[in-house]
Image (tube, rainbow, N blue to C red):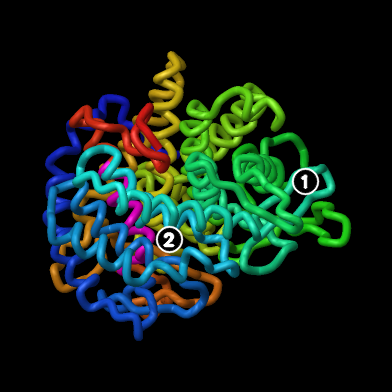
Amino acid sequence: MIQIDTTLQPESLAPQLDRLWRIAGPKIKGLCQRDSPDAGTPVHTVNGRYTSQSWTEWTQGFLYGEAILQFDATGDDEALELGRRLTRDRMAPHLTHEGVHDHGFNNVSTYGNLRRLMLEGRIARDDWELAFYEDALRVSGAVQAMRWTVTADGGGFIHSFNGPHSLFCDTMRSVRVLMLSHLLGHRLLGENDRAISLLERGIQHAAATAKYSVYYGAGRDTYDVRGRVAHESLFNTNDGNYRAPSTQQGYSPFTTWTRGLSWVMSGFPEQLEFLDFVADDELDPLGGRDQIRSMMLEAARASCDFFIDNTPTDGVPYWDTGAPGLTMLGDYLDRPADPHNAHEPVDSSAAAIGAQGLIRLGRYLENRGDRSGERYTKAGLTVLRTLLNDDYLSLDPEHEGLLLHGVYHRPNGWDHAPADDGVPSGESVLWGDYHLMEVALLVQRLIGGTDYPTFFGPLGGEG
C-alpha cells in the first residue's frame, strides 16, 4: 500500500520540478530534431536510445507534445517552435486515422495543448492559427467516434484496433477528444446526413467502461475486487452482449495490468472536470447530471483506491498486480518497489499516469468540500515525488529518456532487459516521459496559482 505523506505540499516539489525541466529540455529538443518521417515513431529506449516498435502509431503526439509542455513549463521558445512546426507538418494523418482508438493521445497532446496555450494567453492569439487547431480537433473527435459498437443494453463504445468486439480500458483517456470536438460545436454525420452527438457517444463510452472494465466488489465473478480493471472487455457483435474480460498487455484477464488501471484513473477525473461545463439541457436526455456524475465518480474512486492499496509504499506499481513472479518477492507491497529485482518489472509509466488521476480526483473532491479528496491529492504528490528522485529520473544526458523503468509490452517481450534474468529495467517509454511532464506541469501550476490545465481549455474560459 502507498505510504501517503499527508504533510506533502506541491511547493515542496518545486526544486525537483526545476531539475526535471533542466534535464528535459535538451533531451526533448534533440529527439525532435532527429525525428524523421522516414523512421518509425519513437516508442521505447534500448540502451538509452529511442527506437520504434511497429504496432500502431500512437506515440508521435507524445513526442511533439513534450516539446509543447517544455515551453509551457519554462518559456523555451525553441521547444515551442519544434512542437508547433512538427504538429503542423506531421500530425495530419493522425486526424483521419480511422483504424485506432488513440486520437485522444496523439491529437489532444499536440493540437489540444497548442489550443489551450493560446486560450490561456501563453502564446500570441492568432484567429487563423486557433481555427487550425480547433478544426483539427473537430475532425479528430468525429473520426474517433466512427469506431462505434452498439451494446445490448442500449449503449455503446469506441472499439479498439482489435475490432468491433473489443473495448479497451485505455480509451477512457482517449474519449476526451470526442468531448472537446463537441465543445467546439461539432457532430458526426452518418448515412442520410444523420447527426450523431459526440457528447452522447463520449458519455456512453464512459458508461460502458465503468460498467464492464471496472469492478466494484459486487460479486460479478470470482475475482471481483473493488477497483480492479480489466484491460479488454469482449462483446458478441451479433447481439451486442458482453461475453468476458481479456487482455493484450496484462498477465491475464483476471488480473490488473497497472497501466490500463492508470488510464482509467486519469480518464474519469478529467471527464468529471469537463462535466461541470456542460449544460443541464444537454445532459438530461443522456441520463442527467447526477446519474452521469455518480457513474464517473464511482469508477474514479474505485480505481484510485485499488491503485493505492495494491502499489508498493513509494507509489510505483509492478506492471501487473497478478504477475506470477511477484510471489518470489515476499511482502512487496510493504516496501518501496524494486526496479532491479530478478522476477518482475515495475512500470513507472503507470505511476506517472496514475499520479495525475489521483491529483485531479483529489482536487475535484476538495473543490466541492469533500475532505476525502485530500487523501487522493497527497497520494498523487507522493507518487510524483518518487518519480522525480534519482532512482527514476534519467540523469544521464546520453540517455534519451526522462523516466526510467517503464514497460511497454511484457508478454510480447518487447522491452529491453539489461541482465540475464530477462527483467526489463533502466529504460524509458515515450508515454511515461510525456505523462511525467504532464503531471509535473499540473503541480507546477498548483504552486504558481495559475490556470489549472484541462484538456478543454481554461476553466470558465472560451472554447
Q: Position of residue 110 (x, y in %)?
A: 35, 57
Residue drawn at (25%, 52%) of the image: 69
Relative vertical location of residue 340 with respect to residue 451 in this rendering, above or below: below
In the displayed structure, does residue 356 sit left or right of residue 409?
Answer: left
Of 39 and 1, the residue lying toward us: 39
Q: Which residues are magenta?
A: 427-441
Viewer-side label of 2, 1: 2
Task: Specify the farthest residue to the top.
Answer: 369
**Which part of the image, by quadrant, shows the N terminus?**
top left
Earlier in the chain: of badge 2 and badge 1, it is: 2
- Crowding at label 1, few (<14), some or many (≥20) Cα neighbours within 10 Å? few
Q: Amino acid at mark 2?
A: Asn
- The tag on residue 434 is none
Q: Amino acid at mark 1?
A: Asp
- Give the image quarter of residue 15: top left
**Residue matched to label 2:** 106
